[in-house]
Amino acid sequence: MGERKMILSNAAFSSSNVFEIHSETNKGTINSSTLHFIESLQKDLNELVHLPNGWDGYNGIPVKFENAYFTIQILEAICFDDTPKPCLVPGSKGDLQIEWHEGLCDIELHVKSPLNVDAWVKTPQTDEDGIEYHLTSDFRIISKYIKIMMEAISDEVAAA
Amino acid sequence: MKSPPRDAENKQIIPHDHEEIHDEDFVIRRVSEKQIVPDKNTGRRRISTLLYKDQDNNGLSIDLKKLIESKDLDPKKYVTTPRWIGSVLLPVQGVRHLGCKVGFNPLDDNPYHGEIWGASTKKIAKKLSALAHWFVPINDIDLR
């Protein structure tokens, strides 16, 4: 697990990396990604930005393009080469949540808007309520928890 | 049911505890397949905590069970479609005990619509999740 790019910034939005999320109202074009699960992630995000209005049974709107884009930026900053792909859950206001639940860890990042993320982490080392963070551009703390989760997954595999 | 309070411009509903939504009542929160996540720690699938988390106190949509019943409608049928396959029940008293407000916010296409205000932290969201019981369960999905 090598060192990761740790700091996100507004410049992320003019990045020349990654891919294209197709949206009727927004298009962002990027070219490459360091994430091994980028194709599958792209498929998931495309689906979320195209959810129909009212998808949640109420007045839910599709995930906003800028939140989908920032999600990729976060994941590129915090994930290692072999980090498992997270699950993505849409919120009702165009927001979304990135979730991992494995290795006896729970990591949840609620992307409310770019540079506005509520994080919650529970590991065997935290108490039952876990720890909450409000993050903007620096996600190094989450990268540390990802590493803890991946080590626990490796231990589980070794013990099996 | 009394109209909910609105702001000075009469546009937005103000977060409120509606006097006709009683502590002994229950409210319904619909669940979409999109809000189900795999939990490899348990080997099962469950509802994401995001179902119970509001964004910046804009309100968490709910259906008012007692109001639906007062119109001789079956609330289980009312809140269930092929898209919103499940739903959970929340006790109003428990929700208010967490410091949240439970109010009325009728919509053109849902006159039984209400809101929970105040669930904007993970701590509250997890406590709401702990209060929830299945109303229309989804097969093989855990509540939390």
Image (cartoon, grey):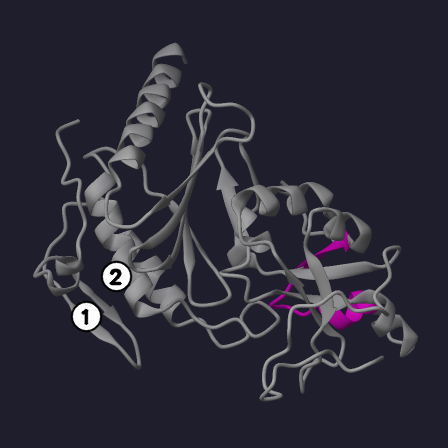
Which of A10/A62 is in front? A10
Q: Which residue is depicted at the point 73% across and 68% down?
A: B103
Task: Please tell me whether residue B17 belongs to the stretch shown in magenta.
Answer: no
Do the residues under discs 2 and 1 have CB atoms within 8 angstroms?
yes
- Label ID, residue A28: 1
Q: In the image, which residues are magenta?
A: B75-90
Q: Is residue A15 above or below residue A144?
A: below
Amino acid type for the residue under numbered disc 2: Tyr
Chain letter belonging to callout 2: A
Q: Can see residue B5?
A: yes
Q: Which residue is depicted at the point 31% across and 20% down?
A: A151
Coordinates of residue B7 in the picture (x, y in percent): 61, 81
Is residue A103 shown left or right of residue A137? Answer: right
Which residue lies most toward the top here? A159
Q: Is residue A60 above or below residue B53?
A: below
Chain letter belonging to callout 1: A
Coordinates of residue A101 in the picture (x, y in percent): 45, 35
Is residue A136 shown left or right of residue B83? Answer: left
* Residue at the disc numbered 2: A69
Coordinates of residue A74 in the picture (x, y in percent): 25, 48
Q: Which residue is depicted at the point 17% across and 27% down?
A: A1
